[in-house]
Image (tube, rainbow, N blue to C red):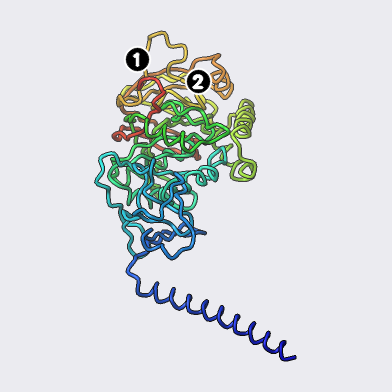
Amino acid sequence: MENIVNLNDVFFNCYFLIGGLFLSYLVYKIFYVLFNNNNYIQINYKSRGHTWRSILCNKSIPYNIYCTTCGKLMLHQDGLFCECCGECNFHRYRDIIIPPTCVQVEKGAITSIKPLLDDNWEPLIIFANRKSGSNRSDEVLSLFRGLLNPIQVVDISTTSPESVVRWLPPRCRILAAGGDGTVAWILNSLLAAGHMGAAVGILPMGTGNDLSRVLGWGPGCGSHLDAHSIITSIKQANEQVLDRWKVTITPRRGRLGRARERVVFAYNYASIGVDAQVALDFHRARSQFLHRYASRMLNYVAYAWLGATRAWDAGACDALERRLAARVDGAELALPPLQALVVLNIPSWGAGVDLWSMGNEGEVEPQRIDDGKIEVVGISSSIHIARLQCGLAEPYRFTQGSKVKIELNGTCAMQVDGEPWMQGPATVRVARAGQCRVLRAASARAAL
């Protein structure tokens, strides 16, 4: 009996000792946090946060810290690490990563980036759009968050590009993972912020990807995404200037007075007619049910089906030449029977169709994306569109110019860079609005 009592005393003393040591450790950690001078840089990203702290103050943590990028042991090096996922001196990607110490934060919001004193430093910013045609933006976001500072990887379905470009460093490169609409959104954001130091490359994840085709990034991304290969391609890409066009739409005065003027910017093309109607039909179908099964192949099938239905019912696009008058550089165009009028800035339309050059035997000037000229062509029907995409027909080639004025009488579908809407009677003016900087893949042919 006495032995049992002594044994209980031993167990009690052991538990008391272990509990006392644990409480002492907790008290130590509390005082350490309260009086330690190490500052934390808090970078919140929606559901998870990143807490950056000095590696030198991390001696009390009983495990080694390895860089998630290069696998290098970081315990005995200067720098910062994230308590959630690690970081170091960034090794192979130090010239494209924004170090946490360069991030200027006020009231929980990023205000600016302090540039590094390194001529080779040119940060890479990733913009990915979950709503693009291929529905693979989650994969892109996951790939690059493991390699870059989390603030450099932006999901624009939840964080607008306008809120990001305000703090971009003076010189950087941008990767737009999405379709033509996503690229245009980012270029517009850079214009509004007056940021002229950023050049935009493309990871094609839309349906048509026309600008991506022209700049050598291809018609779409492969089934396997290699982040290291993508980064290498962006770093090796050449800068290219691209004309920007201001499209001003002035509605006619109605019963309730003059409607508000609308201004948008075009980088690829703008059109009025049946091609815009098909794009609008697809946009409505995708917003209702196709978004659940988004894929590029399904998008192509949907476009083909909707285009075929317009062969029997052109709707408000039929006999467009009777309700539309166009002038280019002051000269009026003689329009044949049309269902669409298109103004082109790049040699790719409708997922890769080079309208201006099809069947051209030298009777018109070649098309360039940086010459301050825009090309005007016509399309007779949706069947004509299908034949153009198969290379079995030519468009109506009208002229090149620097200013276009269109008088639309009646209502018809209109689109700018793949973003469609229904347009009522209005005057549409297209004029040059400077240039922007884009990236051409190093493997692409010489600039157009």
Residue 371 sits in quarter:
top left
First reached walking from the N terminus: tag 2 or tag 1: 2
From the viewer's perspective, is 283 left or right of 248? Answer: right
Q: Nearer the viewer, mark 2 or mark 1?
A: 1
* Residue 312 position in % (x across, y down): 64, 26
Q: Residue furthest front?
A: 3
Q: The residue under label 2 is which amino acid type?
A: Pro
Q: CA distance from mark 2 to mark 1?
A: 24 Å
Q: Which residue is mark 2?
A: 337
- Residue at the bottom extreme, as displayed: 2
Q: What number is the disc on residue 414?
A: none
**Which residue: 32% across, 26% down?**
370
Q: Within 10 angstroms of label 1, few (less than 14), some, or many (20 or more) residues?
A: few
Q: Residue at x 53, y 43 (%)?
A: 137
Q: Amino acid at mark 1?
A: Glu
Q: Quadrant of the C terminus?
A: top left
Q: Residue furthest right?
A: 1
Residue 273: percent from the left, percent from the top?
A: 50, 30
Residue 346 drawn at (x, y percent): 40, 26
Most foreground residue, 152 or 242 = 152
Query: Label 1: which residue?
Result: 365
Question: Could one spot residue 263 in this view of the protein?
Answer: no
Please say if 241 is above or below 150.
above
The residue under the point 43% across, 50% down is 73
Q: Is residue 227 above or below residue 307?
A: below
SS at circle 1: loop
Relative image position of residue 400 (x, y in whole percent): 35, 21
Q: Relative to 136, say whether 219 is above or below.
A: above
Please give left or right for residue 73 compared with residue 382 in the image.
left
Under circle 2, the secondary element is: loop
Could you say which quadrant of the image residue 330 lies in? top left
Picture quarter with the N terminus = bottom right
